[in-house]
Image (spheres, rainbow, N blue to C red):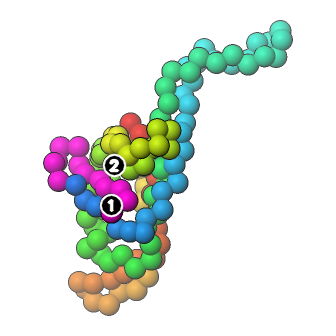
Amino acid sequence: MVAAKIKRKSDSTWLDLPTPVVMTPAVNALDSSKSGRDNNTGAMFRDKIAEKQSYIVTFPFGLNNTQVAKILQIVMESEFNLYCPNPKTGTYDTKTFYTATVTPDIHHIESENLWYYNEFSFEAVEM
């Protein structure tokens, strides 16, 4: 079973994410500048213009340099596709995301060609 997969927007080849992978979803409501509070009554009013999802994607301890490089080459593009569970629909779907920062921590280096990482995460934010 594939828990989630990623690909460049311009590519047709998917990369299955290593398992176990932990995905922490968030559904974010975006409001227009017309939203606010009525100064007379104190009541809130809202002009919701969109909903966007984000995920904290956490990889397990022990991925090697080749595995991490393949992931970073995709997620550090200006945008990428992510196929994963959608908490709002209860199904899998594909959406376009971006990632700004990834800080993988190298656990140990065995040689110039092989090293391993500690558990690390990145945030995927829907475009």
Q: Residue at x 54, y 28 (%)?
A: 30
Extreme residue toward the top, this view = 40
Instruction: Inspect the magenta stretch and tell me whether residue 3 lies in it.
Output: yes
Q: Amino acid at mark 1?
A: Val
Q: Quadrant of the C terminus?
A: top left
Q: Which stretch is magenta?
A: 1-13
Crowd rating for badge 2 (residues with CA inside 10 Å; few <14, some 14–19, many 20+): some
Where is residue 36? Give x, y as percent.
68, 19
Q: Residue at x 44, y 72 (%)?
A: 60
Q: Residue at x 73, y 19 (%)?
A: 44
Give the labeled residue for mark 2.
Answer: 83
* Residue 120, numbered label: none
Tell me, yes or no, whether the two marked residues, 1 and 2, touch with CB atoms within 8 Å. Answer: yes
Crowd rating for badge 1 (residues with CA inside 10 Å; few <14, some 14–19, many 20+): few
Q: Amino acid at mark 2?
A: Tyr
Instruction: Inspect the magenta stretch and tell me whether residue 111 lies in it.
Output: no
Q: Is residue 119 above or below residue 34?
A: below
Give the labeled residue for mark 1.
Answer: 2
The local secondary structure at tag 1 comes to loop
